[in-house]
Amino acid sequence: MDITLRELADSDLPVFWEQLTDPELPRMAAVTRKYHYDRGHFDQHWAKVRSDPSVILRTVLADGAVAGHAAVFGPRSEREVKIDLVELTLS
């Protein structure tokens, strides 16, 4: 399996929404937010994150398929990395 990162594109957001609304997510997630259940909140969240120049966003690809996203954020002295991935079965 080939894993790569690329710049986040507008066309990734519908894929992220589809992944986020998987019925299994609430069972597996440690924490859920309003944007996990409401497309309007989801769009607002991503508009805010994407407009912040201090946040680094990348789309994670597994064998060319969108598998999730990675973000680096927070103050320089306390940078955090968040990676959200889906489980993919590739053949």
Image (cartoon, grey):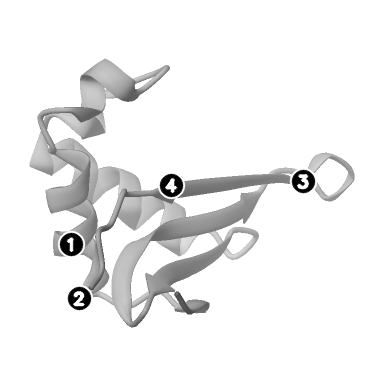
Q: Quadrant of residue 20?
A: top left
| Residues under numbered marks 2 and 1 in contact, where contact means CB atoms less than 8 Å apart | yes
Q: As displayed, is residue 13 above or below residue 86?
A: below
Report the front residue among 77 and 87: 87
Label whose residue precedes the other's in the sequence (1 or 4): 1
Label 2 residue SS: loop
Q: Is tag 2's residue or tag 4's residue first in the polypeptide sequence?
A: 2
Quarter of image, res 27 = top left
The kind of residue tagged 1 is Val
The crowd level at tag 4 (other Cα within 10 Å; few <14, some 14-19, many 20+) is some
86 is higher (above) or lower (below) than 2: above
Q: Check disc 3 and report the residue beneath it.
A: 79
Above or below, comparing residue 64 to residue 57 in the picture: below
Dot 1 alpha-carbon crowd within 10 angstroms: few under 14, some 14 to 19, many 20 or more: few
Spatial CA distance of label 2 from label 3 is 27 Å
Task: Return the x and y of residue 48 as percentages of the image width and height.
Answer: 39, 51
Question: At numbered mark 4, what does the secondary structure look like: helix, strand or loop?
Answer: strand
- Residue 15 has which mark? 1
- Write the residue at 20% across / 48% down: 19
Label 2 vs 3, first from the N-terminus:
2
- Is residue 39 depicted above or below 1 in this figure? above
- On residue 31, the disc is none
Alpha carbons under labels 4 and 3: distance apart: 17 Å
Toward the viewer: 14 or 3?
Answer: 3
Residue 43 at x, y percent in the picture:
20, 50
* Residue denoted by label 2: 11
Where is residue 49 drawn, in percent x and y? Answer: 44, 53
